[in-house]
Image (tube, helix red, strand yellow):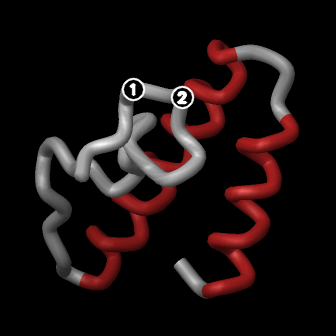
């Protein structure tokens, strides 16, 4: 993803109203990234943890990993 695409995706994810909608957006994004990598002849890992899943500096208390 380009820096502009990452910024737009981050903004979309921050502005959704429900966890279900966030999941739908994430799945659609993942499908698009798989399509792009296939077109370029690159293989994505089956399970990637690129989003941090609540362990970043803005995560809920007690979920950060140090």
Q: Which mark is residue 2?
A: none
Residue 41 is situated, as x and y percent measured from the top left of the image, at 19, 80
Structural distance between the alpha carbons of marks 1 and 2? 6 Å
* Helix, strand or loop at mark 2: loop
Image label count? 2
The residue that appears at 53% across and 38% down in the rendered structure is: 59
Against 57, is 59 above or below?
above
Q: Residue at x 29, y 84 (%)?
A: 40
Kindly identify the residue that appears in the image at 70 percent across and 58 percent down: 9
Q: Is residue 52 above or below residue 25?
A: below
Percent from the top left, x then y, of residue 24?
61, 27
Q: Mark 1 highlights which residue?
A: 62
Q: Is residue 24 left or right of residue 52?
A: right
Q: Secondary structure at mark 1?
A: loop
**CB within 8 Å, label 1 to label 2:** yes
Quadrant of the image occupied by residue 54:
top left
Say which residue label 2 marks.
60
| Whether residue 34 is situated above or below residue 31 in the rendered picture | below
| 51 relative to 63, above or below | below
x and y, in percent, of residue 49 in the image: 26, 48
- Packing grade of label 1 (10 A; few <14, some 14-19, many >=20) is few
Tell me: 12 left or right of 28. right
Relative to the observer, which residue lies in front, 23 or 58?
58
In this rendering, position of residue 62 left or right of residue 15? left
Of residue 43 and residue 16, the one placed in the foreground of this image is 16
């Amino acid at each position: 993803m380009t820096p502009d695409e990452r910024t737009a995706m981050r903004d979309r994810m921050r502005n959704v109203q429900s966890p279900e909608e966030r999941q739908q957006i994430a799945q659609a994004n993942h499908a698009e990234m798989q399509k792009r990598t296939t077109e370029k002849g690159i293989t994505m890992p089956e399970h990637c943890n690129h989003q941090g899943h609540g362990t970043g500096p803005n995560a809920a208390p007690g979920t950060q990993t140090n």
